[in-house]
Image (spheres, rainbow, N blue to C red):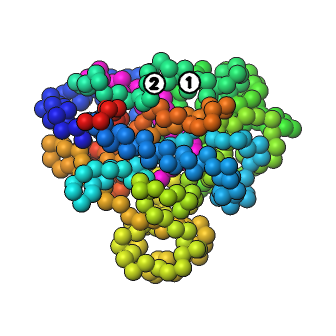
Amino acid sequence: MIPSVRQHYNQQFSQARYEAFLQDLKSVFPGNPAFRIAETPVFVPGYFTRQLKTAGEQIIDVITRPDFKKLTGKAIPEKRRIPGEDAHTHFIALDFAVCEDEEKGLFPQLIELQGFPTMFAFQALLAEKYRTHFDIPEDLHNYLNGYTQQSYFDLLRKMIVGQHDPREVILLEVNPHEQKTRIDFYGTEAATGIRTVCISELIREDRQLFYYRDGEKTRIRRIYNRVIFDDLESQAAAFPSEKIPDLTSDIEVEWVPHPNWFYRISKYMLPLIDSPYVPPAYYLNKLQVIPQNLEDYVMKPLYSFAGKGVLIDVTREDIESVPDPENWILQKKVAYAPAISTPNVPAKCEIRLFYFWPEKDERPTLVHNLCRLSKGKMIGVSYNTEEDWVGGSICFFEEKDQ
């Protein structure tokens, strides 16, 4: 996206350097990552960085509205509502497609958002390894708003551990060591001293939770929550309810972030945002007229993750046959730009911005990022894995206008 930097990078790229980069990356936590890493980072020019920041602030304006909880009260399924919700989430992730306007200029469009953690530890490692093995300009930064690797991890540790002994804080997931994102769990452990625990390993006694750490039964006072309860429900055969402690009744534990925020800050709030950087979206059950140009729309289930259930080629029959329209949205489709030059076919790009929100701050702060490159219809590390110059990556930003 910065032509001069892109041209230089592609010229100095070699398969040997890429293989050495991968070998170094995979040596940190042997056998990982379990997903494809792209051959290149993305170099974001100053004007696009500014657009991303503006878009993010406009979305944050909605999240920080005094009536936001009232607006999103129906977002949380009753069977998944957990008591003890705090004033705001600790983390926000915003996903933007890199798109192209009629004058061939690039601009961001929001695709999805979540009040939930993402690859916070791994992305720092990934950026470090790109810098080690490739020529990345010193004036481009993967961290934003003045953060450095040191200050970023200092804040991440504070956010996750809080005032507690790390032994009494856990990263909670479903089958964590089988998740494709497990390298991030291991990086989080290394950075914070906490342990990764499967939800089936929790022990509940009255209102308290415990787990076994090095053979010792240990109290859990704070949970860094990575459980997507939709995912847990889809694995009911492996994790029947009798194997999982009841978390929907009051327990003496702090959540980081609280599970309810996964639903509040999600596709559910897309119709609430009015911004040039957010494609129009409509709740399906409130759609008064089905658009004639359905080829310009995509239909998304409210309760899904990793792109599951998304209908890209929508028909009137699809809309009319949905048995639960209250659980779906219709969103204006965006056209990803072939913005990343590669040795063959240009790649499309999606950028995720990381926001951290300390408990006493009025607003969250933009700190870091990830991006994903694709040459197919779907964006994500689970798709078009047979292509080259696609997969997980990182952005290096220019934070001044050109």
The quadrant of the rendering that contains the C terminus is: top left
Left or right for 292, reference 251: left
Q: Quadrant of residue 245?
A: top right
Left or right for 63, reference 44: right
Q: Mark 2 is on which residue type?
A: Tyr
Question: Looking at the image, is mark 2 or mark 1 earlier in the sequence?
Answer: 2
Report the residue at 60% width, 20% height from top: 193
Q: Secondary structure at mark 1?
A: helix
Frontmost residue, 74 versus 33? 74
Q: Mark 1 is on which residue type?
A: Leu
119 drawn magenta: yes
Is residue 325 at least partly visible in the picture?
Answer: yes
The numbered mark at residue 155 is 1
- Foreground mark, 2 or 1, reads 2
Distance, label 2 to label 1, CA atoms, is: 10 Å
Q: Is residue 373 above or below residue 77?
A: above
User: Which percent across, then down, holds residue 14?
Assistant: 16, 30
For disc 2, the marked residue is: 147
Report the residue at 42% width, 36% height from top: 369
Frontmost residue, 311 versus 401? 401
